[in-house]
Amino acid sequence: MEDQKFVTVNKLENSEIQTFTFGYPPAELILESGEKLGPITLAFETYGELIAQKSNAILVLHALSGDAHAAGADGWWDSLIGPGKGLDTNKYFVICSNVIGGCRGSTGPSSINPKTCKPYSTDFPIVSIGDMVNAQARLIDHLGIEKLLAVIGGSMGGMQALQWMVSYPERIQSAIPIATTLKHTPQQIAFNEVGRQAIMADPDWKNGHYYSSKVPAKGLAVARMIGHITYMSDASMAEKFGRRLKEDKEPFKFGAEFEVEGYLHYRGDNFVKRFDANSYLYITKAIDYFNILNGNKNLGNIFRGLKAKVLVISFKSDWLYPSYQSQEIVKACKLAEVDTTYCEINSTYGHDAFLLETEQETQLIKHFLNTASNGHNGVKQ
Amino acid sequence: MKQAPVKAEHKIILNWINKDASLLDLGCGDGELLALLINERQVHAQGIELNENSIHRCVAQGLSVFQQDIDTGLSEYADNSFDYVILNQTLQQVKKPDFALKEALRVGKKVIVGFPNFVQASARFQIFFKGRVPVTKALPYEWYDTPNLHFLGIADFKDYCKKRNIQIEKSAFIRKNSRIKLFPNLFAEIGLFVCSH
């Protein structure tokens, strides 16, 4: 693996990217931890046109390794976003921003700390899913949008959707949390911790102060490999790789011999080129600390009073965020008498299904959004 | 919406339901009845259905529906959460009909139950003269691929309600898509009841 340095802002090749900066001192964003962070830059992209009434805006929320580039060439959810697609950009104004703590144009540990003129590194404050959502709300203010037609996301994106339902219930007309959970379980935390330990065990990590030298590429690649295993399923791996050996298998022991090994190496190495190891640590911590029940012992009270319509989607083979966790979300919605639809899509892709099983997902989302914007779709009012 | 003719059983249920009522349809299928009730009675309706394809068709019509197995119960709902709970063509297919009906009666002020009358005349005829498990227009399934787990007649249901102290407030019987009054246990293909505690 070649040595590389991580440079964050202005590195994004995509020209559609825009930025919004807010929270200049003394008006910094106050984080859930009580710490202040500012100024904060959010990188975002938009697709489609905002209509005059500003009632057709949809905020797309990305997962751990995602960024603002959701649609277009190499967009992480291009299968769902675009003209005629599930999030039809002929009808809707779609916004996606990189989360705070990230490394794809938004303020995170690799950004320059204005106080020291050096990267924040591990001096970056701990951020939460709630903080990410508060920053997004500022972006929505900036765009002049009072109420979003929908917030939608899978995995960590789904957590943000749930957080919107709690933090800004009056600012959303609908929410679509996909393959997600009300709180991270020990198993989910454990996988993230192995990833973090891999990064921190890399001698190049240097307690996070590696920005002027080699990045902890090995550690971050291993973290990504573990992640990928949890995103797939037994069936999808068997189908994709079987026990096939790599064609260019090296003649000595313990190289990548099986195709699955080659795939994981490739995924790991590729990830290092576009992702910052410290961001990986911060964002996985935000995910692990996520618990929408915080301070609220009664499941039925979390979404009490929410007027938004909710569509919850899970996938049968997703063992990282199993359906029972989505059913818990549905249960909380039922108890709060929130207008909710729930579907478990039959898929073999595992957790990755939310990015891959888009045909079924598209149908559900398309019709649901029609209903959310027009009342009962197909049923005369 | 397709302009399919409204089924007799759906017309009867429609007439039993007040405007603006809250309603839970257990085993709502493709949402045909729910859509009708929303259109005609402006009910606040929620469906529960197990089949994924049916869920897709419900969502396509703008209905709110949960994918759930009714046999797991309705524990999230408080007593009397709904004006009506509908168990139409569902009771004979659940694993625990006694439990399902009990839960329905708990969360609904009134429960509308509809099921095929398994002891109608043509079925009796097939059993008696052919010595075969009946397959009729109203009971179209072969024994090896039927979704029906429980076989009951109209008299059986009435006996059951008596045993469980369930009040039958209203009833209606259907044969060949029309309402009938005489000897329902013998002639009706479908029995419909409004039940309460």
Image (tube, rainbow, N blue to C red):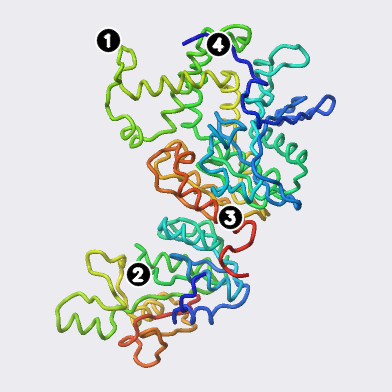
Please name the residue that numbered disc 4 is placed on. Answer: A4
The residue where tag 2 is placed is: B92
Determine whether label 1 and label 2 are within 8 Å by CB.
no
Query: Can the viewer see residue B27 in this picture?
Result: no
Residue at image coords 36%, 36%: A236
Q: Are marks 4 and 1 in contact (CB under 8 Å)?
A: no
Amino acid type, mark 2: Gln
The residues bearing labels 1 and 2 have C-alpha atoms spaced at a distance of 64 Å
The type of residue carrying mark 1 is Pro
Q: CA distance from mark 3 to mark 2?
A: 28 Å
Q: Position of residue A69 (x, y in %)?
A: 60, 33
Q: Is residue A129 left or right of residue A147?
A: left
Circle 3 or circle 2, nearest the eye = 2
In this rendering, do the residues under marks 3 and 1 share a single chain? yes
Q: Does residue B72 appear to the left or right of A310 in the view shown?
A: left
Q: Determine whether A4 is above or below A148 in the image.
A: above
* Subunit of label 3: A
Same chain for mark 3 and mark 4? The answer is yes
Kind of residue sitting beneath label 4 = Gln
A228 over A375 or under it: above or below: above
As measured in the structure, the alpha-carbon distance from the residue carrying label 4 to the one carrying label 1 is 28 Å
User: For mark 1, what is the residue?
Assistant: A251
Q: CA distance from mark 3 to mark 1?
A: 61 Å
User: In which quadrant of the rendered image does the C terminus of chain A lie?
Assistant: bottom right
Residue marked by disc 3: A335
Snapshot quadrant of residue A138? top right
